Image (tube, rainbow, N blue to C red):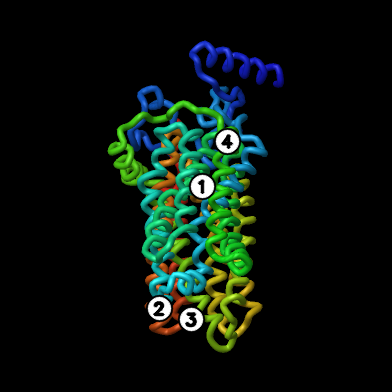
Amino acid sequence: MRVRLLTLALASTLGNTATGAVTNPSPPRPVAGREGRSGRLPYPVCPEEKDTPAQDPSTASHTSASSGAPSPSAAPGALMTRGLTFLFAVASGAAVGNPYWAQPLLDFIARDLHASAGSAGWLVTATQVGYAAGVLLLVPLGDVRDRRKLIPLMLLCSAVALLLCALAPSFGMLLVAITLVGVTTVSGQLLAPLAGDLAGDGDRGSVVGTVVSGMLTGILVSRTVSGLIAGAAGWRTIYVVAAAAAIVFAALLYRAIPSLPVKTPLPYSTLIASVWTVVRREHSVRWTLVLKATSFGAFTMFWTELTFLLSGPPFRFPGTGIGLFGLLGVAGALAARRAGRLHDRGLSLPATGVAWALVLTSSVLAAFAGHSVVLVVIVIVLLDIAVQAVNLLNQARVFAVSDTARSRLNTAFVTGNLLGGAIGSAAASMLWAADGWTAVTVAGTALSCFALVIWALGSRGPLIVPRAG
């Protein structure tokens, strides 16, 4: 058996060398699961790529494995080492944390720049609007530009914007600068699909899970670190430190990221339009985006109203005490990494169902947590673990749709996230005004049931990622 495998590997390598291609000679590991087939190209690709669709480990068949043909997505798998994965995770966390520096500092900033508390709140809104624009307009470039140059360039642009924040002489200038921070801080969303490209089929979920875990940790740490640094050295210092970190990571990533050929040479207008083309034509993407928007909407709704719950009777926690509850989200970051391994084992869809069952459980428990800190902690941990697992499993499945359009797929994925979060935040205010914490928990339970119905129906076909024919 070993001789046969070595013979197949040697033949594959020689064949690929003769055609100028570099591939991983190891055939994809067969994983039991239902198979799907799209039968069409969902977005513009190069002519030579039309016969090499991606293969999801959760839907790979024994037939494709026994043929001895290597998966095209596994080609650069050997390039994604543990060290590079760690660097991607840390750099992504540092980049994604940039839009969140200001959240605990609004009071510091308002006093220093003689602005009202209401005006200071616009800094958070401006950052998020800028971030959404960056995701929509810049992240798709990862499919048509050399990311070894693009990602460090984005980090350097982010460093300039951060320095402008540190030097802003007025609130108006800070508002403009912090919007630019949001636009340029998209390196993490470029690194995640690049990690998917560099990883092999057998460990793509684990690698992407590690990078996503770094992002989640970066968001949590940024809120805590910014308050500590601002208290010791002023709010401007945190932006100087963040700018210096961006410059360091730009240099490290430029040296570490391997040069890859441009996957899909397209005009910019066609590139942006193709983001919506893949969503429109790939039913697995559409169904997955519905699940993701639902999970993040429920998650945002919960955290928005948790502040009101903990600050009012019977808890009456101060702002600093409420902020410490956010550190419980580390459990979710760890869950994201573990969930990636489940995807690699072909258990993406079953694990998604289990995660949604946990979301439902946490929503039911939340209804009884209005007078118990212990129950609040349990609900936070359960919800974070479940939602971040859903996030990673959905993202890994979306990345499996195409080798050549992962940056555009990530754009659609993050945009769905932002829309779900915006709807969740808006709904939270209305629900709290209607019936307080009870209304929020009822809505969370309803959303969980809705998602479980979508999952149950989608597991019969629509959520299954198309595989190579």
**Residue at far top of view:** 18
1 or 4: tag closer to the N-terminus: 1
Q: Position of residue 253 (x, y in %)?
A: 57, 38
Mark 1 lies on residue: 188
Mark 2 lies on residue: 431
Q: Label 4 neighbourhood size at 10 Å, few (<14), some (14-19), many (20+)?
A: many
Quadrant containing the N terminus is top right
Residue 447 shows in this picture: yes
Task: Identify which amino acid the numbered label 2 is placed on.
Answer: Leu
2 or 1: tag closer to the N-terminus: 1
Q: Position of residue 363 (x, y in %)?
A: 53, 72
Mark 4 lies on residue: 199
Residue 419 shows in this picture: no
**Residue at far right of view:** 2
Q: Label 1 neighbourhood size at 10 Å, few (<14), some (14-19), many (20+)?
A: many
Mark 3 lies on residue: 437
Mark seen at residue 137: none
C-alpha gap between disc 2 and disc 4: 43 Å
Local secondary structure at mark 4: loop
**In this view, the mark in front (1 or 3):** 1
Task: Identify which amino acid the numbered label 1 is placed on.
Answer: Gly
Task: Identify which amino acid the numbered label 3 is placed on.
Answer: Trp
In this view, 306 is above or below 227: below
**Residue at horizontal 52%, vertical 35%?**
197
Task: Identify which amino acid the numbered label 4 is placed on.
Answer: Ala
Q: Label 3 neighbourhood size at 10 Å, few (<14), some (14-19), many (20+)?
A: many
C-alpha gap between disc 1 and disc 3: 34 Å
